């Protein structure tokens, strides 16, 4: 098997009649006691249906928001039980707790194929502390463990790490497997040339990912607010554009490292500037050598877009994280939308991660032409930074 991460899959488990503890991501927006967007519930269906067909007695666990160890009704998962019943077309039982005798009784009543949703695991501090006793209590009602919540895999919590440890075994759900396969493909088996595009607001958020791609990418394209710290590090006047003074040195070192390793770093050559961070104001395209002292750079310019596009043509692997401009405002969205189109058209394996980057790709209308959209947010970034995610590491290795 090629280098990568290979974990036991939910498909490998014999689940008939077994009590299955499944960690899902039901961290959905709730408004007036109703689920406002059921995307994450829908996303859990493939794994859920599979384990139901296999005859598991399904116990679902999730967090919702940040109740910080208190039983706050506004963070209850109860509305999710209703929404899940509707999409499944089947009753979903709910207990107003995630541990204790009521849970044990509800699990006893479950027949193969039936589903029980537990109350928010973050109603207990033991969850985020990965407390062994809390983990043991969660695990006490289960025979098997599956994690399908990639978005929390970078957290060593009870429901992501403690429970599979207590049970001695854990498998990846279908969503988890898909994320791990796509991200591993980029980190461990990327077809060259590899182009990485980074943007977004802050250098500090992205520095670890960029560092890791110095060892993986042939070319790194930098845009967004972040690029101005790099331009400043090269001695350019950046006006009132976003600057992280305390990252200038890191930016300088990174450019130096790239040069010595033969990785081409492409920075914007022109930018769209405006006198205010506001929609509808006057804006201009200027060279990065002529940014007016009082103006703010809010997008990459057309010459930069053309240069980035030519870097993308012929790329066999592309990863993109971070919009290239303030794409929320139409006036400063051209760079991001242009690159989204070019990424979708490049013909290689394309991976996009980051909440705002996903919005941008949807706005550009090209989401269905991207090979993999990683929904993990912080988890995707940590994975791409080369870090081991505790919620993945704890899952049982697949026999090779
Ligand atoms: P992601 O969520 O995809 O990881 P980030 O959160 O890092 O992306 O960055 C997205 C934000 O960066 C957007 O809100 C966007 O407006 C902002 N941004 C992009 N370019 C600039 C810029 N030139 N100046 C200020 N903010 C910018
Ligand atoms: Mg963001």
Image (cartoon, helix red, strand yellow):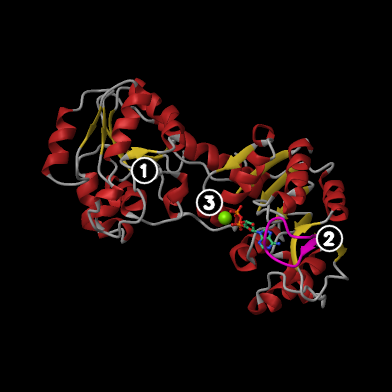
Location of mark 3 (residue): 377
Q: Which residue is at a point 88% across and 70% down the rendered structure image?
A: 289
Q: Say if disc 3 is inside 8 Å of ligand 1.
A: yes
Residue 345, above or below 223: above
Prevailing SS of the magenta stretch: loop
**Distance from Cα at disc 2 to Cα at disc 3:** 33 Å
Residue 31 is marked as 1
Residue of label 2: 284
Q: Quadrant of the N terminus?
A: top right
Q: Please rate how many residues cluster around mark 2, counting C-alpha atoms within 10 Å: few if below 14, some from 14 to 19, many from 20.
A: few
Horizontal placement of 102 versus 34: left or right? left
Q: CA distance from mark 1 to mark 3?
A: 23 Å
**Is 126 drawn above or below residue 314 in the view shown?**
below
* Quarter of the image where ligand 2 sits: bottom right
Q: Residue at the location (44% across, 37% down)?
A: 37
Helix, strand or loop at disc 1? strand
User: Do the residues bearing badges 2 and 1 touch, measured as CB atoms within 8 Å?
Assistant: no
- Residue span colored magenta: 270-284
């Amino acid at each position: 098997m090629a280098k990568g991460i290979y974990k036991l899959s939910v498909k490998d488990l014999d689940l008939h009649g077994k009590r299955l503890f499944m960690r899902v991501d039901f961290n959905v927006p709730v408004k007036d006691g109703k689920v406002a967007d059921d995307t994450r519930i829908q996303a859990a269906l493939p794994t859920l249906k599979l384990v139901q067909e296999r005859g598991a007695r399904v116990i679902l666990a999730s967090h919702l928001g940040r109740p910080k160890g208190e039983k706050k009704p506004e963070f209850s998962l109860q509305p999710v039980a209703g929404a899940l019943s509707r999409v499944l077309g089947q009753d979903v039982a709910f207990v107003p707790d995630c541990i204790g005798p009521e849970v044990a009784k509800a699990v006893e009543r479950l027949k193969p194929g039936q589903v029980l949703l537990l109350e928010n695991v973050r109603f207990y501090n033991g969850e985020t502390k990965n407390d062994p006793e809390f983990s043991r209590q969660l695990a006490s009602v289960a025979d098997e463990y599956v994690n399908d919540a990639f978005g929390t895999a970078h957290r060593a919590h009870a429901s992501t790490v403690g429970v599979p440890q207590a049970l001695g075994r854990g498998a990846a759900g279908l969503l988890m497997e898909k994320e791990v396969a796509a991200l591993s493909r980029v980190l461990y088996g990327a077809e060259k040339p590899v182009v990485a595009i980074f943007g977004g607001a802050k250098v500090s958020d992205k520095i670890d990912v960029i560092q890791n791609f110095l060892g993986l990418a042939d070319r790194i394209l930098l845009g967004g607010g972040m690029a101005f710290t790099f331009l400043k590090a090269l001695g350019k006047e950046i006006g009132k554009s976003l600057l992280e003074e305390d990252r200038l040195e890191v930016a300088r070192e990174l450019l130096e490292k790239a040069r010595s390793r033969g990785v081409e770093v492409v920075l914007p050559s022109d930018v769209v500037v405006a006198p205010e961070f506001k929609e509808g104001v006057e804006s201009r395209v200027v060279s990065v050598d002529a940014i007016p002292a009082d103006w703010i750079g809010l997008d990459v310019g057309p010459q930069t877009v053309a240069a980035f596009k030519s870097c993308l043509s012929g790329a066999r692997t592309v990863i993109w994280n971070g919009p290239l401009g303030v794409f929320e405002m139409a006036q400063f969205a051209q760079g991001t939308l242009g690159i989204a189109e070019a990424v979708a058209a490049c013909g290689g394996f394309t991976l996009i991660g980051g909440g705002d980057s996903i919005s941008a790709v949807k706005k550009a209308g090209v989401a269905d032409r991207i090979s993999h959209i990683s929904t993990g947010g912080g988890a995707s970034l940590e994975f791409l930074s080369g870090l081991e995610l505790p919620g993945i590491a704890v899952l049982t290795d697949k026999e090779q």
